[in-house]
Image (tube, helix red, strand yellow):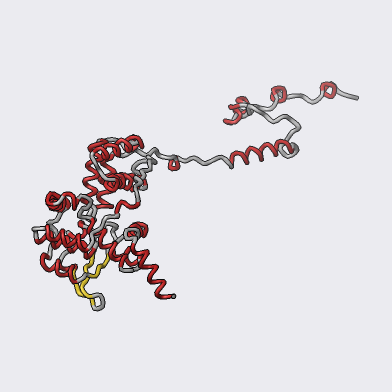
Amino acid sequence: MRTSEDQRGPERTREDQRGPARTSEDQRGPERTSEDQRGPPENPRKPGKSAENDPLSFKKCLFAFTRWSQRPISLPCMKKQKTKSASLKDIFGVTLAYRWSQKAREDVERRNIKEWEDYLGEDRRVSSVTLGMVDKFVSKCREKGNKPSTINSKLGTLKTALDFSRDRGMHSNELRVSRLSHPSDERTTYFSKEDQEVIEGMIDDSEFKALFVWSIETGMRPSESKRVRASDISEHPQLGWIVTLRETKNGTPRVIPLTPKAKDAWDSVEDFSRFESFVISRYWARLRRKDPEFLNDYVFYTCRHTCATRLLSCGVNVKVVQDWMGHKDIKMTLRYAKLVPSDLCKARDLMFDTYR
């Protein structure tokens, strides 16, 4: 028989009615992390298409990575800096200091530099120099009566300065300065033995006469002769008396054997340092006034041409002549080989007498 308590069932306490006690954390609810606060991702993956089960998605990722890995890398240190163009004064100054200073052509280069700076302006940016400006400069030189060789000397000064400074990042002007073409027989003048005797008789200054003979016998440039000192003259066991040239036009020292006439000319003076280019020009102008018709086609530099011509006429190997004269390019030496047409006849007779 069931009692009334059995009918009511087990008595429920007040706590059972309220349910399990809730802590402060339960009241606040589960703590939300920063990811929960941001909410779901913007592009949630569609259900049913995971990366493992979607081969197309994998191919897209691989393709995207391949394209990304092939992009050129650009770092701040790899950015190409724009070259600030220097002025003409800058490039001529650098080239003069590192290329022409203490060389035989220093005085010539200084004169050429002054002409370029006077014409174009020393503050002109190299980037603004054009071929048209160079052509106008050449025309101006021709109007002044400059010979092609003189104009080429001035063009060579600009060309060397441009190339030298461009290689050192001073400018990016790709202007190429070309030499003037002129007839190959420009240097066909040389002194015969009779011409030399006449000119020596016309010279009334003993020191200048010694320089004249010295230049013919050695073939040295006037700029090289004025730098010779007594210590450069010595007696070699095999070669005899020689002169050692330490400062030359092309920067390569060389040794020249001295003929008896050359040795006598040096002994009479022992110093040619006073014969600057303008001094030689002044002496030569005096000679021309004495006989303009005879000396019209001759300049003092003809002494050097005469030496090269005589060496080749004597049958000296052209390579030996090149070393003697200090020619950087053998083509320069070969020009003198065309000066004496009679040498062809000598060659013919020599071959006939040897193999007849």
Above or below, 244 relative to 26: below
Q: Position of residue 10 (x, y in %)?
A: 79, 26
Determine which quarter of the picture holds residue 9: top right
Question: Image point 28% across, 52% down: which residue?
Answer: 99
Q: Is residue 230 left or right of residue 84?
A: left
Q: Is residue 81 left or right of residue 313?
A: right
Question: Image point 24% across, 48% down: which residue?
Answer: 109
Determine which quarter of the picture holds residue 194: bottom left
Above or below, 12 relative to 292: above
Q: Is residue 157 left or right of residue 42?
A: left
Q: Position of residue 356 (x, y in %)?
A: 44, 75
Above or below, 278 relative to 323: above
Give the tally of numbered discs.
0
Q: Position of residue 67 (x, y in %)?
A: 61, 39
Q: Is residue 168 visible?
A: no
Q: Residue furthest bottom?
A: 237
Q: Is residue 322 left or right of residue 304?
A: right
Q: Position of residue 241 (x, y in %)?
A: 20, 73
Q: Which quadrant of the figure contains the N terminus?
A: top right
| Nearest to the observer: residue 332 or residue 165 | 332
Q: Is residue 125 visible?
A: yes
